[in-house]
């Protein structure tokens, strides 16, 4: 008789729509803003954000456009744990935009980001979009690599936000 140890069963991922004003959504969006602000400020100013700066950022970039019928906030759960989020909103009748893509650090590398991207693409398709666009910063190297790996191609800028450095697009439904 051997003392074989069973391999752990991987936890399932689930993605579902979440109201933007829910406590879960507010917490995830604040974590997202804190991470992107801190990475920017550490790189450019050698410091982290303050809670007041995060409050200002959340106010400057509200997520109210991520509500039906022209938007959605999707939340990923890994097992029973809230693990990340992504938003999709219509820019026009045929173009959706990906917003606030975030996976909590402890859940990265487990497949959640790909699941969130697929769910956002499906949501965009349901809203009638033919393509999905996004912007990000060049210092967010993991995000840039993720988008490229999932078939997004670099495009010319489609807006002039000071923090947007690279722009991507993907036809909805393509792999």
Image: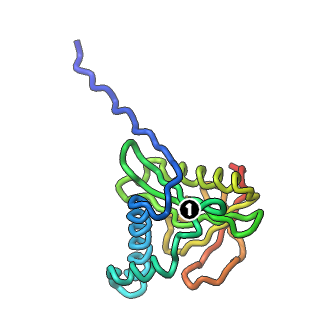
Determine the residue positioned at 48% across, 44% down. 14
Q: Quadrant of residue 57?
A: bottom left
* Residue nearest the viewer, comparing 138 with 102: 102
| Residue 153 seen by the camera | no
Indicate the quadrant where residue 50 lies.
Answer: bottom left
Element type where label 1 sits in the image:
strand
Q: Nearer the viewer, residue 1 or 90?
A: 90
Q: Is residue 161 visible?
A: yes
Residue 68, percent from left and from top: 61, 60
Q: In the rendered view, does 24 fall on the left or right side of 127?
A: left
- Residue in the image at 65% along x and 50% along y: 122
User: In the drawing, does residue 153 fall left or right of residue 147?
Assistant: right
Residue drawn where x is 32% and y is 79% of the image: 51
**Residue 138: horizontal and vertical position, in percent?**
54, 74
- Height in image: 155 above or below 1? below
Q: Badge 1 local density, few (<14 within 10 Å), some, or many (20+)? A: many
Identify the residue under disc 1.
Answer: 87
Q: How is the image coloured?
A: rainbow
Q: Is residue 93 left or right of residue 139?
A: right
- Residue 39: where, in percent of width, then height? 41, 75
Question: With respect to residue 158, does 172 lie above or below?
Answer: above
Question: Where's the N terminus, which quadrant?
Answer: top left
């Amino acid at each position: 008789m051997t003392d074989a140890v069973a391999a752990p069963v991987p936890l399932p991922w689930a993605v579902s729509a979440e109201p933007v004003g829910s406590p879960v959504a507010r917490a995830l969006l604040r974590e997202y803003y804190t991470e992107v602000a801190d990475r920017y400020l550490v790189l450019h100013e050698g410091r982290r954000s303050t809670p007041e700066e995060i409050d200002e950022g959340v106010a400057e970039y509200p997520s109210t456009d991520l509500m039906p019928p022209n938007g959605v906030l999707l939340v990923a759960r890994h097992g029973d744990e809230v693990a990340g989020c992504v938003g999709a909103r219509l820019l026009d009748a045929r173009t959706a935009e990906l917003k606030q893509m975030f996976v909590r650090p402890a859940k990265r590398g487990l497949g959640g980001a790909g699941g969130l991207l697929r769910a956002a693409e499906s949501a965009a398709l349901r809203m009638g979009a033919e393509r999905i666009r996004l912007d990000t910063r060049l210092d967010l190297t993991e995000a840039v690599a993720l988008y490229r790996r999932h078939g997004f191609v670099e495009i010319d800028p489609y807006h002039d936000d000071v923090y947007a450095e690279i722009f991507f697009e993907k036809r909805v439904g393509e792999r």
